[in-house]
Image: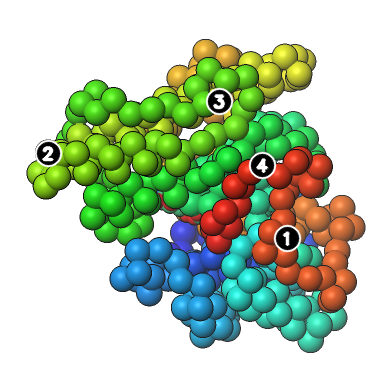
Amino acid sequence: MSRPTPIPHPAPGATLVLGLETSCDETAASVVGRDADGRAVILSNVVLSQVEEHAAFGGVVPEIAARAHTQAIGGIVRAALEEAGVPLDDISAVAATTGPGLVGGLIVGAMTGKAIAASRGLPFVGVNHLEGHALTPRLTDALAYPYLLLLVSGGHTQILLVAGLGRYERWGTTIDDALGEAFDKTAKLLELPHPGGPNVERMAAGGHPARFILPRPLRGEKRLDFSFSGLKTAVRQAAQAHAPLSEGDVADLCASFQAAAADTVRDRVTLALARYRTDHPGLADPVLAVAGGVAANGAIRAVLADACARHGVRLVSPPLALCTDNAAMIAYAGLERLEAGLIDAMSAPVRPRWPLDETAAPLVGFGKRGAKA
Ligand code: KG4
Ligand code: ZN
């Protein structure tokens, strides 16, 4: 269970939102409010990761996840309230992730949130998990709308224009695997432990990125979408051609894969930054924010920093604990929604598939894995 140091207390009588996150393999609860100056503050942020439960299976098993959420949620909510030093009586609203994600986990979080809200007569806010990621830079850096967001997690690879609360334009998404998924699958086929991303990065540090010539899918295309399954297949073919692999081969494959992934991100993001600058020429503080677990990757961060510098755009990367799945982002999105009067009925459904930009046409293969967001 990780508990980043909480920030000081908000003013007495401030709006406080209890947020719950259970859409994948983290059971999380958090209390977020505003201080006297209107700044958002995180009073607690408790995350229980199920990585160990799923490690033996090399990925997230929905049934195991749902059971683990059921067992953990009560204690995690109590821990979040305790750490915040806030009794339930002082909470103004309850927010829970109601999609997208694994249906079992979503039901556990939504039902728990609704039950707490109903028992105290509090408003309930159902939050889109992706909105939580999208608004995190407003929580951490008080960003003004509009800004560009690159979401790179185990389940999503998207470039979004965050135009306002509830106003998201999806400029690009993956047509097959998510970037984190590509890292995880590469790790699995090279027999590195789950979760794969950090292990691929660790191995890549000792490898030669130019040893294997791997594809850069969709590079040079004008559309802003991503594709990673061809890259993953190329890694598999190279691994098979060189079997049995020495540790040096694995390091070189990891380095070559990571270089191809980073190049692809550079290419897509460069196009997106150019469009952002053209579409929004007068912005005082143009920003690209990054969210999702892959934001931890040094090679990806380096290409983003370089692309942003070239386009006169500020790169904002929230602390990693807030880039990966957590409930502070859900509580904060709930707070913005509450302040805008956007509360939900107790009958609000969970939505395993729930695109942020409902006007964007679904792409072939998009959301194939759908489990992680
Ligand atoms: O956002 P996140 O914690 O969970 C969701 O997918 O929602 O992201 C996890 C993903 C995994 O695919 C993991 O392998 C990847 O982020 N990841 C990384 C690194 N750290 C985590 N990928 C590449 N390099 C890393 N250092
Ligand atoms: Zn996520």
Q: Earlier in the sequence, mark 4 or mark 2?
A: 2
In three-dimensional space, the C-alpha distance between marks 3 and 2, rounded to whole angstroms, equals 31 Å
In three-dimensional space, the C-alpha distance between marks 4 and 2, rounded to whole angstroms, equals 38 Å
Residue underneath mark 2: 248
- Kindly indicate whether the residue at mark 3 contacts the one at mark 4 (C-beta within 8 angstroms): no
Query: On the picture, is 88 further left or further right than 307?
Result: right
- Kindly indicate whether the residue at mark 2 contacts the one at mark 1 (C-beta within 8 angstroms): no
Q: Earlier in the sequence, mark 1 or mark 3?
A: 1
Q: Secondary structure at mark 3?
A: helix
Residue underneath mark 1: 127
Quick one: label 3, few (<14), some, or many (20+) residues within 10 Å? many
Residue underneath mark 4: 363
Query: On the picture, is 8 further left or further right than 68?
Result: right
Q: Earlier in the sequence, mark 4 or mark 3?
A: 3
| 45 versus 246 height, above or below | below
Q: Residue at x 40, y 63 (%)?
A: 59
- Per the rendering, the mark at residue 337 is none
**Residue 123, position as x, y percentages in the image:** 83, 71
- Kindly indicate whether the residue at mark 2 contacts the one at mark 3 (C-beta within 8 angstroms): no
Q: Amino acid at mark 1?
A: Val
- Kindly indicate whether the residue at mark 2 contacts the one at mark 4 (C-beta within 8 angstroms): no
